[in-house]
Image: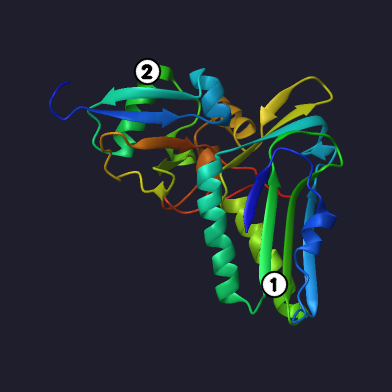
Amino acid sequence: MFTISDTSIDADDLRRQFANDRAGAFVTFEGWVRNHNEGKDVLTLEYEAYEQLCLNEAEAILHEAKQRFSILDATCVHRTGALAIGEMAVWVGVSAAHRGAAFDACRYIIDEIKLRLPIWKKETYVNGSSGWVNCQNCASHSSNHSHDQSAKIRKGDAAAPVHQVGSK
Amino acid sequence: MKTGSKKIHIQYFALMREERGLSTESYETEATDAQQLYDELNKKHGFSLTSDRLRVSINDKFEHWNHAINENDRIVFIPPVAGG
């Protein structure tokens, strides 16, 4: 199951929902808000999501994970709204009979979530500037220099996932 | 309403929302596909992102740029994402 939350993620509560006598492994990933990005000191940040498309796309990702890996259950929660440094932005949990599948599926889910979900992050920096990550730095590059910069970042089929630069 | 023209609903997020100055609008267009629609809007509003940096969603589903636009469709232009 995938949900979007505009309040703090309660990892303990999520973990309890995985109780299953058939599970021998439980792997989680937590994405936290860090205090720097691409050389700049981050003060605060804000996530915005296109909720209905997120729900559709995330359900597809979780379904793919269940088909590819031998897992019992998988859940993901993503925050929206204003977040402080150190707060949890995303939580992924996967249970399986064995650890290999749980690790692999957890990695698959967070990688696809980052690549495919329509979620945007606006960072405000200590120096007072702010910008939408992956949008504005690149946009200013392409207007200052040439469109080659953006072509490097975004190539290929129109309906294919947007290739991302930078990651947690 | 002119022949071939249709009313659609556009939703804007993140950088697109800030540049358009609103979150949603109903819009009448003769554009036949998503690419034509974006080109038309971009000419009016001068967005900073070219369509090769965007994806397009029609009725809550990712579609190709040559996907047809129909009456009452909900269209969203998706800027580069940064979740996770």
Q: Residue at x 57, y 55 (%)?
A: A58
**Image quadrant in which the N terminus of chain A is located:** bottom right
Mark 1 → mark 2, Cα distance in angstroms: 47 Å
Disc 1 residue type (three-letter): Asp
- Where residue A93 appears, as percent x and y from the top left, is 74, 63
The reply to the same-chain question for discs 1 and 2 is: no
Horizontal side of A98 relative to A61 (left or right) equals right
Select label 1 or label 2 by which is in front.
1
Horizontal side of A89 relative to A4 (left or right) equals right
Q: Residue at x 82, y 22 (%)?
A: A127
Q: Which residue is mark 1?
A: A104
| Quadrant of the image occupied by residue B83 | top right
Crowd rating for badge 1 (residues with CA inside 10 Å; few <14, some 14–19, many 20+): some
Of residue A14 and residue A138, the one placed in the foreground of this image is A14
> Circle 1 — which element?
helix
Of residue A45 and residue A91, the one placed in the foreground of this image is A91
Q: Which residue is mark 2?
A: B44
Q: Chain of mark 1?
A: A
- Where residue A115 appears, as percent x and y from the top left, is 59, 52
Q: Chain of mark 2?
A: B
- Where residue B8 appears, as percent x and y from the top left, is 32, 30
Q: Is residue A155 visible to the viewer in this orientation of the structure? A: yes
